[in-house]
Amino acid sequence: MFFEATKLWAVRSTRITLASALIAHIGLSWLLAFSAKASGDNGYESFMPAPYMSLASLQLAQLFVAALAALSITSEYSNGTIFSSLQAVPLRARLLGAKAAVIGILGFVFGLLLIGAGTLLAAPAAGHYGAFGADELLIALFGGGFYLGALSMMMLGVGVLLRSTAGAITSAFVLIFGLPQILPLFNIQWLQDLAFYLPTNAGQILGTGQTEPYGATVAVLVLVLWTLVLLGSGIWVFKRRDA
C-alpha cells in the first residue's frame, strides 16, 4: 500500500488535479454563500448552514477526484507500467486492493479538507444566513469524506473495466451529472425513485442528515453497494483479463 501511495503522489498530475479541485471547491463555496447572503438581504429565503453550502459545492470538485481515481489505473495501461506493477505484485487482487485502499483513503481525507475549507470561506461570506452548529459541521465532514472516498473506489473499478481514461471520465460525468438530471425527467415513477439511489444523491443525503426519502444508514449502504458492484466488477475482470 505504501508503494501505491508513493507512486500516486509522485506523479505531478495528482498534485495539480487535487489543487484544481480545491480551488474550484472553495471558489464555488464562496460564490454560493455570497449568493445566499444577497438573496437573504433582498427578502428571499436563503438560509443554509455553511457546511451544507460547502457540501453542495462538491459538484465540481468531485469530478476532479473521480478523474484522478480513474487515472490511477488507466494511466498504467496507457504507458505500459501495468506490466512492471504486476511483476512487483503478481497477485492481482492484492495489487488492486492496495490501489483501492490508497485512493479510498485519499478521497476520504480530501473530502474532509474540502468541506472544512469550503465552510471556512462560506461562513463569513454568508453571514447569519449560513449559521451552523457543531453537529451540522460533523455531519457534513463525514458525509463529504465518505462520499468522495466511496466515489474514488467506484471510479477505480470503472477505470479497470474500461482501461480508457476518456471512457472512465465520460462514465464519471454520466454517473455524477447526467443520470441525476435525466432520470427525474421521465414520467415513470420507478425511474424517478431510482434517482434517489444514485451515488450523488446518497452523498447529499448522508452529508446533510436528511431523513427523506431515507436516512444516513441507508445512504451509507447505497454508497457501499455502488462501491462493491463497480470495484468488485473491476477486480473480477482484472483477475481474468490479460494486462
Image (cartoon, rainbow, N blue to C red):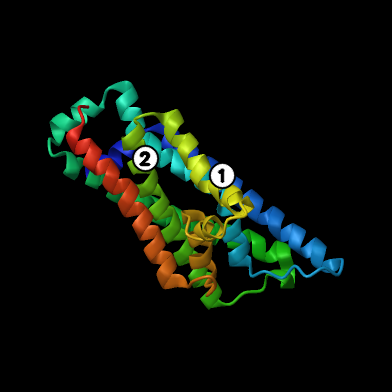
| Residue 19 seen in this snapshot | no
> Residue at point 52% right, 75% down?
211
Residue 120 position, x and y percent, is: 60, 62
Quadrant of residue 33 within the rendered picture: bottom right
> Residue at point 35% right, 42% down?
156
Which amino acid lies under the numbered mark 1 shown in the image of this protein?
Gly
Which amino acid lies under the numbered mark 2 shown in the image of this protein?
Val
Query: Label 1: few (<14), some or many (≥20) within 10 Å?
Result: few
Decide: is 132 above or below 161: below
Decide: is 201 above or below 86: below
Q: Which residue is mark 1?
A: 178
> Residue at point 52% right, 41% down?
173
Q: Which residue is mark 2?
A: 158
Mark 1–mark 2 Cα distance, whole angstroms, equals 16 Å
Number of numbered labels in the structure image: 2
Query: Label 2: few (<14), some or many (≥20) within 10 Å?
Result: many
Left or right, residue 151 beside residue 176: left
Decide: is 130 above or below 161: below
Upstream in the sequence, badge 1 or badge 2? 2
Residue 182 position, x and y percent, is: 59, 47
Residue 239 position, x and y percent, is: 18, 37
| Of residues 195 and 243, the one drawn nearer to the viewer in this rendering | 195
Q: Are marks 1 and 2 in contact (CB under 8 Å)?
A: no
| Residue 69 seen in this snapshot | yes
Residue 119, numbered circle: none
Kind of element beneath mark 1? helix
Kind of element beneath mark 2? helix
